[in-house]
Image: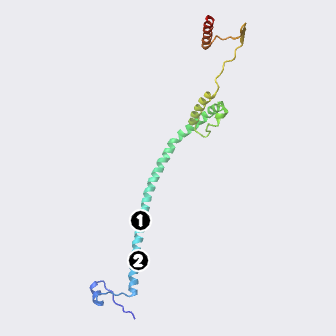
C-alpha cells in the first residue's frame, strides 16, 4: 500500500507533514514531468513559429529587393541590346576579311587561329601570325646574272663588291712584295 501525501507548493507545509522530506507518488511525478514537457514543447513551438515568421518576413523583404534588382537588370538588357546587334553586324562584316587573311597564311600557321574567338582577338592573332610568317620566309635572292668570259676566265657582270676590291688590293700588294725579294 502506497501512502499518498498531498503536494503543496510551500516548503513549510512539506517539511511539516513529512518531517522535512517531501514525498510524491508516481502519478504526481508523472504529472509534474508531463507538465514540464508540455511547457517546454510550447516554448519550443513558439520559438520555432517565431523564427519561421521572421524568416518568411525576411524572405518577402529580400524578394522585394530581388524584384527590384530583376527590374534593373531587365532595363540594362534592354539598353544593351542595340549594342549587341551592332557587334554582331561588325563581326559579320569582318568575317570575309578575316577568312581571306587566314587563307593567305602558310598552311602550318592556319591552325593556330582560334575560329571560335571574337573578331578583335582573331585580328590580333592574325597580325602576330603574319609577322611570324614574314620572318619565316626565306630571304629573296636576286636572280643569277650571266657570266662574261675574258682571256683569264669567266667574270661576273657586276661591279666588284667592296670585299672583292679589298681582296684584289691585298693580292696585288703581296705580289709586289714577292717580286721585290
Q: Quadrant of residue 160?
A: top right
Q: Nearer the viewer, residue 134 or 54?
A: 134
Q: Nearer the viewer, residue 164 or 87?
A: 164
Q: Quadrant of residue 122?
A: top right
Q: Residue at x 40, y 77 (%)?
A: 38
Where the N terminus falls, by quadrant? Answer: bottom left
Q: Quadrant of residue 177?
A: top right
Q: What number is the disc on residue 38?
A: 2
Q: Secondary structure at mark 1?
A: helix
Are discs 1 and 2 less than 8 Å apart at CB?
no
Spatial separation of the CA atoms under disc 1 and disc 2: 20 Å
Up-down: is 37 above or below 55? below
Place of residue 5 in the rendered image (x, y in percent of width and height, measured from the top left): 34, 90
Place of residue 23 in the rendered image (x, y in percent of width and height, measured from the top left): 34, 87
Q: Residues within 10 Å of mark 1 (few under 14, many from 20)?
A: few
Up-down: is 27 above or below 60? below
Where the C terminus falls, by quadrant? Answer: top right
Q: Residues within 10 Å of mark 2 (few under 14, many from 20)?
A: few
Q: Residue at the far top: name it.
A: 180
Place of residue 112 in the rendered image (x, y in percent of width and height, measured from the top left): 62, 37
Q: Nearer the viewer, residue 179 or 122?
A: 179
Name which of mark 1 and mark 2 comes first in the sequence: 2
**Residue picked out by circle 1:** 51
Q: Residue at x 48, y 47 (%)?
A: 73
Q: Nearer the viewer, residue 170 or 165?
A: 170
Q: Residue at x 28, y 84 (%)?
A: 11
Amino acid at each position: 500500500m502506497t501512502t499518498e501525501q498531498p503536494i503543496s507548493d510551500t516548503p513549510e507545509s512539506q517539511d511539516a507533514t513529512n518531517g522535512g522530506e517531501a514525498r510524491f507518488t508516481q502519478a504526481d511525478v508523472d504529472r509534474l514531468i508531463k507538465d514540464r514537457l508540455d511547457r517546454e514543447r510550447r516554448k519550443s513551438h513558439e520559438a520555432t513559429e517565431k523564427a519561421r515568421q521572421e524568416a518568411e518576413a525576411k524572405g518577402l523583404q529580400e524578394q522585394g529587393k530581388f524584384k527590384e534588382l530583376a527590374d534593373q537588370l531587365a532595363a540594362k538588357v534592354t539598353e544593351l541590346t542595340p549594342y549587341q546587334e551592332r557587334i554582331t553586324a561588325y563581326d559579320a562584316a569582318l568575317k570575309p576579311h578575316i577568312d581571306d587573311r587566314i587563307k593567305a597564311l602558310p598552311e602550318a600557321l592556319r591552325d593556330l587561329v582560334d575560329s571560335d574567338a571574337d573578331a578583335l582577338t582573331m585580328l590580333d592573332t592574325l597580325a602576330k601570325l603574319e609577322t611570324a610568317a614574314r620572318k619565316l620566309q626565306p630571304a629573296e635572292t636576286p636572280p643569277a646574272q650571266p657570266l662574261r668570259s675574258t682571256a683569264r676566265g669567266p667574270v661576273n657582270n657586276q661591279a666588284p663588291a667592296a670585299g672583292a676590291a679589298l681582296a684584289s688590293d691585298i693580292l696585288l700588294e703581296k705580289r709586289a712584295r714577292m717580286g721585290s725579294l
